[in-house]
Amino acid sequence: MYSARISALLCVSVLLGILAAGLTPFRQPRNAVTWLGNENGLHFGRYGTVWSAGGFQAGTLQHEGQHEGSCSIEIWLRPDVADASKTIFAFYTPENPLQLVAIQYHALFILKRERRDDSEHPEVIGIADALHSAKSAFVSITSGAQGSAIYVDGKLVRRFPAFRIGKDCGNALEIGTSPVTSDSWTGELRGLAIYGRELSEAEVQQHYETWTTVGRPAISEDEQAMGVYLFEKRSGSVVHNAVAGGIDLNIPKRFSLVHQIFLQPFWKEFRPRRSYFIDLLVNIAGFVPLGFVFCAHWTSVRPMRHAVLATIALGFAVSLTIEVLQSYLPTRDSGTTDLITNTLGTFLGVKLYSSRVARAVLAKIY
């Protein structure tokens, strides 16, 4: 009876420990977005996000040399750190939640466009030495029939003839993280504008000069501004659009994702990084105790048929439960890689119990 109680206690303790490690914190954190106070702008901390109240309407005018679906984006920002690899903003649809994504990768500013029918081969452009910690940058992206161009502080950095974002910037917008996974960018956002046509180099320069000196860009009607956010309210949960009748931005009370992934396929989760392989080893090792103690309990203490298979099935079921619940937690990722590694860890725990050394030790305990 004494041994049975110890064995059962070990099983319950290991199971609860794994569930706690996989699901903590079991809540939505508060949204870490605050107004700057004495200046126009927002500060994004860890787990911070802002959403548009709807989709924008991309420009469709074709006169005066403008191509249907051309657009421009201006963003005035200051990163907190220089070694980040995070999502600054993303335009998304329910069918294609990563349609157009802006990323800070260390000092690089990267723009990635993902096609709905070919998510495995996104189009990517970027510029180096654009983003530095504690230093503001005014980044402008213009796109039209001749491709796209990226400017920093009103100056042209590079043109990309084969890359066009077209109507992509006419969709809904999430700022501060990816729509599908927690990828929080930290820093200050001083201004944001979206236009329904391609801005000229002179217009980009003028917007930079007026916005950074007087607090608002000098915009004419023919520039087709769809969204201009000055962040001048300095309080509340709504960032108003300076364009009459335009889409506002909302600051939710709790951090959440608009299209969190459910059980992402393992081949899409793969990353050729050291941290990825460390996570694999941690997930394997974390389930070894479960395989060991449950196999010991169902083999030596409370014998049952097919104890090995039952233990491995339990490991898979526990892992699946965690991954399903993680799809509702914005700070966690739900994927199939963990299903594989956790089940493997359970199997290794079973094999460890089958070793002579383990059986000798357990014989003394039980």
Image (cartoon, rainbow, N blue to C red):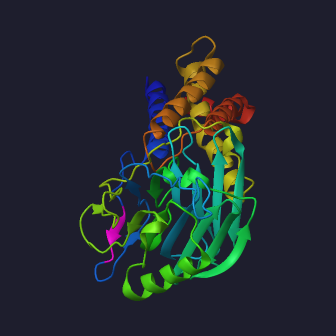
Quadrant in which the N terminus appears: top left
User: In the rendered structure, does residue 80 fall within the stretch colored magenta?
Assistant: no
- Name the residue at 52% across, 17% down: 302
- Name the residue at 67% across, 65% down: 148
Quadrant in which the C terminus appears: top right
Which residue occupies the extreme bottom position in the image? 213
Most foreground residue, 163 or 62: 62
- Name the residue at 44% across, 45% down: 258
Residue 131 position in % (x across, y down)? 59, 77
Residue 292 position in % (x across, y down)? 61, 32
Residue 277 position in % (x across, y down)? 71, 51
292 relative position to 161: left or right: left
Which residue occupies the extreme left position in the image? 236
Q: Is residue 208 above or below residue 240?
A: below
Q: Is residue 243 visible?
A: yes
Most foreground residue, 114 or 313: 114
Q: What kind of secondary structure does the magenta stretch mostly adopt?
A: strand
* Range of residues picked out in magenta: 32-36
Q: Is residue 138 above or below residue 180?
A: below
User: In the rendered structure, does residue 35 fall within the stretch colored magenta?
Assistant: yes
344 relative position to 200: left or right: right
238 relative position to 77: left or right: left
Q: Is residue 361 above or below residue 256?
A: above
Most foreground residue, 54 or 82: 54
Q: Is residue 15 above or below residue 154?
A: above
